[in-house]
Image (spheres, rainbow, N blue to C red):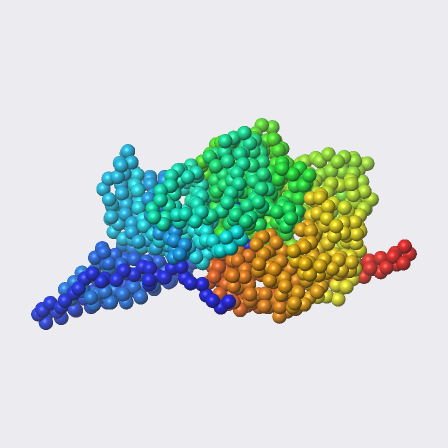
């Protein structure tokens, strides 16, 4: 997977309506009876009822105490769980009571008993009491993880979506193997209504034997289970579990859901259905054993509307179609064994284009709305080429008979690697050279390369449990750059990895809110939260470091060995490192080295001191906030020390050398010839660590860089800039050194170093925006940017990296008030509004739209752009317009924008958080978004769910530039008011740390930076007068 008012959403599940089955078939008449007998019976009934109520209250009271003592224990073994979990209790084996808290259940019990003859009341209450005791015994055995005694072998799934009713019905038969006797079967479900269930024992040939009836069935919403208990433990053997169910197609972008788009050709709205199952959303679509290690085959049948050009796609090719009136039943070939999260299906009327993969007979197809299918050509070429490259790289053929890629109008992630049916956001799959920028083009290439890498690393071999997710996502993140490099060797993808993956994650990992690559996961919320930059970008960075350590050839051999060894199965980090260690010629312990990187969070800073011809290296954990060194942290078995692959070059030798700085060594001494004037450590920043030199060595490197930047690679220049700024921000380096280093940028011409340069300027701009030194900062920034801006201008060429560089430096220049750039942006913007069909070149369009509207800054201009946004069919262009609308500096217009965004007719659900991030990036809009989110948090949670990770990430996005105690207190009060953060728990902690660091930065650095800037501006003014 690649890493998106006042009307409340209609609930997709009403327990009262969906689960209550009223007793309407029985008519009870009072029969004459002796008064004494009636009184005795009634007294007995009261005695039983009181006993039952007392017992229930004892259970509830006891469990409350237990929960207080064991909040982390996931204790499902007490009657309190009924408050959330009991859906159905069988009374007389054929009566159902709806899901309710226990006291409501008791109310229903009392209501039920009023409907039966007095002589049956005692029997009824005794039966109910027995059922509750039985359920309690089952609950004691349940946990977050499925029992190991059950192993699914095959799913036979039949689904019938109804676009008009916005719902679907389904039947599933699960062939499963019982490997150890067990008296209950839990299957995952969420927001589904199970209407019928039965279990059959199978003989050795697979033929059904007698049916086994459950004594009790109920739902456990907290653990997301449907549970069936049996009178006797099931014997070892094969069984088939049959379930009927139904669900909703609305109000989410996960599971199986319904979406729509406006067809430009037919001029009407078209409905589609799509799926998104990773990580734990298959259970939203059908009952299943929803854990990645429980691989099984799938036999899928989907009913689609007959006619009207609808078709169905799934993981495998179509095996047969049968028309049944208004519906056509489409059956697919059986899949290979795979995890539940990889199953997928799409119902649409999309068009497609096709191409063969290399010399194979396998078709790769791209599907998109008919009016946009021409935009699929580039993704088709990239997909076919990258698959061919991966076949050679991994030494394993593509394992399925077909590969489809589909552009979905509403999609919560960038893309999803479903095996044989990869689904994407439109912006990640469709490219049109007339409307798409170079940035858009590269995104399509990288996302396609990432998802197709998963067809081997993640699909063919899957992580055993979510704690090893980095094996899937980290490897795919690393390998996507190789795939794109294979297709576009001139894009410098090897060095773009440094700025796009490594630098952002180094920043996140330097906080106490970070987490290890390998961590314990104990809830669906924690699984969802785990899909973050640590898993993706740190994982990819560690694979990159490992490749540099063991060599590219050895890593390739080990990867092929690993894939072949665990084909169609699951594996762990230990398995992958074992495969690497089996390579010949390695004189170091790969597992020991990697354990220090995967089992503890954070990263080291290597401190370098020159002593004659020796360089003495020490290490410590790098933290972005100096105060964090005084905070008690989670203990680490390696005491936050790492076994670091140290690489370096010297002024006399550009060939990198490598040595290991072991975690248990206090220091490492490296000797160089006396002729060496400087040593640059961490060549091309292949290592996951920062380097801090003594001030004298920093000065020497700065001088060398200014004298001859070509002595350093583009990655090394980017590295020096990035480390210097990060160390200065963390108060571990004098800020004047970082600022002095930045002045070399006046001579820089390459994209990778300038990408770091513009990021550093933007960061410093945000820090000083509200201070008295902002004016001097803008003069300093404009002086650095002027040479490259004047070289590039708004005239676009054909070089990919130059076009990416242009958008970076023009955006930065306009952001600091570069007069000629702003004038040109405003001129082009006005020309566009006058003739909207004549748009600026795609590679300057973002700058023209954003800063042009900001310069014009009128309601009329904003309204015109808003109307163009509403009618724009191209998803990439729509995002450019969405961003531009956030640039206005009129507060009430931004507030209008925030309010309009809540209506999904204006902004698709997938884009809502992106839009809110755009508005919060505007200094005028930041507080508006913050206030809105605080005031409407409950509505946001109701619509998106507390475990929507994009909702959780919205908080650090909004608050990233807060730098006052007042704002920090507002955040703390907000978090205290809404303590349940769901999948945003770490994000909240990260947000608090960032704001504290911002406050500290101003305390420690504002005066020093202001003094340096004033001096720099004064010297520049004198220099300009002389020149």
On the rendered structure, is 570 left or right of 719?
Answer: left
* Residue at the farthest right position: 1026
* x, y percent for residue 729: 69, 56
Q: Residue at x 51, y 65 (%)?
A: 937
Q: So how many labels did they put on this image? A: 0
Depth check: give the residue in front, 936 or 149: 936
Answer above or below: position of 617 versus 970: above
Residue closer to the observer: 295 or 846: 846
Q: Is residue 1023 visible?
A: yes
Does 731 sit above or below residue 419? below
Residue displayed at 56% across by 40% down: 380
**Which residue of the protein is positioned furthest toward the bottom in this rendering?**
35
**Picture quarter with the C terminus:** bottom right
Image position, residue 754 (x, y; %): 73, 49
In percent of the image, x 38 and y 59: which residue is there? 13
**Residue 554 vertical position relative to residue 185 in the rendered view, above or below:** above
Residue located at (50% from left, 53% from top): 266
Q: Is residue 293 left or right of residue 990?
A: left
- Left or right placement of residue 667 versus residue 191 in this view: right
Percent position of residue 994, x then y = 62, 59
Report the front residue among 813 and 114. 813
Q: Where in the figure is residue 993, as x and y percent of width and height?
A: 60, 59
Q: Nearer the viewer, residue 154 or 946?
A: 154
Q: Residue furthest top?
A: 584
Query: Do we see residue 742 in this rendering?
Result: no
């Amino acid at each position: 997977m690649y890493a998106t008012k006042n009307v409340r959403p209609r609930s997709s599940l009403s327990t009262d309506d969906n689960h209550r089955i009223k007793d309407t078939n029985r008519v009870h008449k009072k029969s004459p009876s002796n008064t004494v007998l009636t009184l005795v019976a009634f007294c007995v009934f009261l005695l039983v009822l009181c006993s039952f109520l007392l017992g229930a209250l004892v259970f509830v009271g006891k469990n409350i105490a237990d929960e207080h003592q064991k909040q982390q224990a996931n204790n499902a073994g007490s009657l309190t769980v009924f408050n959330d979990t009991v859906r159905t209790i069988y009374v007389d084996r054929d009566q159902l009571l709806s899901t309710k808290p226990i006291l409501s259940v008791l109310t229903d019990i009392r209501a039920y008993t009023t409907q039966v003859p007095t002589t049956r009341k005692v029997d009824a209450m005794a039966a109910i009491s027995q059922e509750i005791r039985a359920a309690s015994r089952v609950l004691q055995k349940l946990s977050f993880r499925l029992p190991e005694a059950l192993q699914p072998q095959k799913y036979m799934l039949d689904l019938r979506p109804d676009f008009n009713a916005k719902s679907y019905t389904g039947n599933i038969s699960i062939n499963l193997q019982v490997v150890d006797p067990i008296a209950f079967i839990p299957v995952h479900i969420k927001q589904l209504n199970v209407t019928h269930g039965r279990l059959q024992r199978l003989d050795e040939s697979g033929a059904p034997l007698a049916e086994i009836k459950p004594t009790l069935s109920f739902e456990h919403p907290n653990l997301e289970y449907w549970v069936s208990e049996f009178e006797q433990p099931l014997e070892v053997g094969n069984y088939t579990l049959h379930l009927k169910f139904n669900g909703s197609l609305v109000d989410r972008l996960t599971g199986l859901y319904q979406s729509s788009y406006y067809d430009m050709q037919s001029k009407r709205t078209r409905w589609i259905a799509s799926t998104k199952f990773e990580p734990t959303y298959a259970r939203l679509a059908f009952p299943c054993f929803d854990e990645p290690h429980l691989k099984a085959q799938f036999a899928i049948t989907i009913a689609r509307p007959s006619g009207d050009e609808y078709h169905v796609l799934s993981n495998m090719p179509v095996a047969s179609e049968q028309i049944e009136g208004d519906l056509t039943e489409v059956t697919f070939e059986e899949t290979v064994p795979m995890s539940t999260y990889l199953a997928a299906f799409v119902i649409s009327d999309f068009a497609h284009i096709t191409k063969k993969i290399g010399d194979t007979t396998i078709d790769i197809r791209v599907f998109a709305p008919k009016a946009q299918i021409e935009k699929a050509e580039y993704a088709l070429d990239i997909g076919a080429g990258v698959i061919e490259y991966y076949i050679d790289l991994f030494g394993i053929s593509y394992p399925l008979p077909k590969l489809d890629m589909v552009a979905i109008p509403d999609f919560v992630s960038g893309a999803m690697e479903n095996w044989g049916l990869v689904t994407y956001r439109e912006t990640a799959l469709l490219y049109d050279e007339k409307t798409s920028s170079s940035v858009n083009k590269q995104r399509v290439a990288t996302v396609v390369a990432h998802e197709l890498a998963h067809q081997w690393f993640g699909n063919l071999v899957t992580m055993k449990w979510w704690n090893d997710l980095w094996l899937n996502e980290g490897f795919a993140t690393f390998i996507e750059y190789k795939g794109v490099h294979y297709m576009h060797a001139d894009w410098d993808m090897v060095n773009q990895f440094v700025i796009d993956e490594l630098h952002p994650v180094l920043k996140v990992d330097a906080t106490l809110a970070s987490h290890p690559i390998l961590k314990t996961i104990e809830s669906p919320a924690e699984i969802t939260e785990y899909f973050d930059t640590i898993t993706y970008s740190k994982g990819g960075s560690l694979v990159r470091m490992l490749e540099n350590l063991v060599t590219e050839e050895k890593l390739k051999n080990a990867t092929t060995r690993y894939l072949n060894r665990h084909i169609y199965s699951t594996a762990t980090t230990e398995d992958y490192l074992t495969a690497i260690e089996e390579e010949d010629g390695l004189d170091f312990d790969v597992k020991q080295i990697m354990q220090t990187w995967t089992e503890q969070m954070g990263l080291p800073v290597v401190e370098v001191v020159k002593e004659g011809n020796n360089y003495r290296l020490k290490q410590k954990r790098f933290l972005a906030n100096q105060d964090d060194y005084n905070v008690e942290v989670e203990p680490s078995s390696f005491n936050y020390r790492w076994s670091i692959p140290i690489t370096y070059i010297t002024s006399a030798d550009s060939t990198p050398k490598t040595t290991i700085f072991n975690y248990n060594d206090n220091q490492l001494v490296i000797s160089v010839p006396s002729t060496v004037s400087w040593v640059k450590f961490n060549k091309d920043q292949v290592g996951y660590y920062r380097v801090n030199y003594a001030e004298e060595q920093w000065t020497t490197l700065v001088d060398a860089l200014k004298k001859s930047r070509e002595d350093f690679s583009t990655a090394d220049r980017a590295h020096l800039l990035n480390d210097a700024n990060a160390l200065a921000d963390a108060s571990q380096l004098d800020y004047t050194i970082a600022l002095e280093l930045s002045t070399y940028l006046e001579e820089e011409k390459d994209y990778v170093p300038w990408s770091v340069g513009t990021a550093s300027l933007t960061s410093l701009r945000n820090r000083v925006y509200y201070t008295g030194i902002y004016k001097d900062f803008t003069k300093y920034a404009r002086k650095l940017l002027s040479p490259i801006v004047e070289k590039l201008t708004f005239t676009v060429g054909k070089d990919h990296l130059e076009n990416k560089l242009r958008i970076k430096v023009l955006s930065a220049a306009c952001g600091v008030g570069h007069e000629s750039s702003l004038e040109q942006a405003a001129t082009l913007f006005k020309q566009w509004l006058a003739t909207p069909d004549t748009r600026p070149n795609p590679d300057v369009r973002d700058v023209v739209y954003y800063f042009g509207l900001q310069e014009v800054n009128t309601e009329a201009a904003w309204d015109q752009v808003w109307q163009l946004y509403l009618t724009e069919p191209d998803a990439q262009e729509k995002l450019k317009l969405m961003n531009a609308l956030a640039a206005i500096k009129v507060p009430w217009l931004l507030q209008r924008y925030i309010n309009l965004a809540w209506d999904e007719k204006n902004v698709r659900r997938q884009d809502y958080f992106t839009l809110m991030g755009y508005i919060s990036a505007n200094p005028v809009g930041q507080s508006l978004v913050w206030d809105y989110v605080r005031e409407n948090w409950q509505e946001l949670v109701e619509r998106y769910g507390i475990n929507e990770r994009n909702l959780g990430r919205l908080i650090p996005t909004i608050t990233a530039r807060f730098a006052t105690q007042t704002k920090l207190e507002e955040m703390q009060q907000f978090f205290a008011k809404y303590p349940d953060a769901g999948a945003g728990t770490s994000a909240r902690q990260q947000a608090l740390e960032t704001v504290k660091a911002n406050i500290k930065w101003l305390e420690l650095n504002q005066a020093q930076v202001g003094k340096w800037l004033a001096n720099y501006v004064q010297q520049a003014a004198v220099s300009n007068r002389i020149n």
